[in-house]
Image (tube, helix red, strand yellow):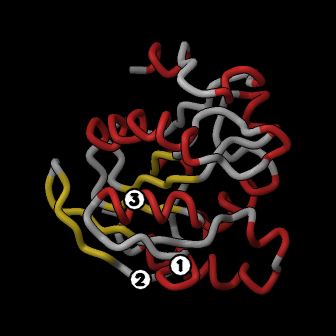
Amino acid sequence: MDTEMLECKKCRLHEGRQNVVIGEGPSDADIMLIGEAPGANEDKTGRPFVGRAGKILDEALEGAGLAREDVFIGNIVKCRPPSNRNPKKDEIASCTPFLDMQMASIRPKVLVPMGNFPTGYVMERFGLDRRRIGEVRGKIFDVETPWGGAAIVPIYHPAATIYNQRLRPVLQKDFKLIGRFNL
């Protein structure tokens, strides 16, 4: 699967990428964080959440009693959109089969979509109505997956707190909720 992702040319995002950002974390993580798309730092390093949003993510994880090593961190889109624009529907459609394979392989007990695009996809993927993050953040949705029962806990994307400081305590509160799932 990794080789297929690294060589993927299913959408136009491959044209400008430096690296495919597959994701990282334990192959049997109980908690899977799902971001939107790699940014410039992630594209450069091939690792998820290593820029400013990554520092915020690390702080939120620590505040919840978790570490990066405890969770799997990935994205719905594996290549950086130009100028960090939102991923387009066809790009998401090209990439989400890889995310589906990752979820099936890891078999997380908790799925944490971060932001509108991951939340919409994950909710719909597991039979829930597609909703905006502001409506569902911090709520727990129990779902049946091909690998058994799981919880979906949508949260704001850590980058949102860079532009809206009032979201920082909300993000920290939501991560404390996620930390309660640390099995």
Q: Find residue 158 and report its image quarter.
A: bottom right
Residue 53 is situated, as x and y percent measured from the top left of the image, at 75, 57
Residue 83 is situated, as x and y percent measured from the top left of the image, at 85, 43
Which mark is in front, 2 or 1?
Answer: 2
Q: Are marks 3 and 1 in contact (CB under 8 Å)?
A: no
Residue 42 is situated, as x and y percent measured from the top left of the image, at 73, 36
Q: Which corner quadrant holds the N terminus?
A: top left
Q: Is residue 94 visible?
A: yes
Task: Please tell me which residue is depicted at 47% across the width and 64% down the height of the picture.
Answer: 120
* 105 relative position to 7: left or right: left
Determine the CA span between mark 2 and mark 1.
9 Å
Q: Which amino acid, mark 2? A: Lys
The numbered dot on residue 174 is: 1
Task: Please tell me which residue is depicted at 73% across the width and 79% down the height of the picture.
Answer: 168
Is 142 above or below relative to 54? below
Determine the CA span between mark 3 and mark 1.
17 Å
Mark count: 3
Q: Which of marks 2 and 1 is nearer the N terminus?
A: 2
Task: Please tell me which residue is depicted at 37% across the width and 37% down the height of the picture.
Answer: 102
Determine the CA span between mark 3 and mark 2.
14 Å
- For label 1, the crowd category at 10 Å Cα-Cα, with few meaning under 14, some 14 to 19 and many 20 or more, is many
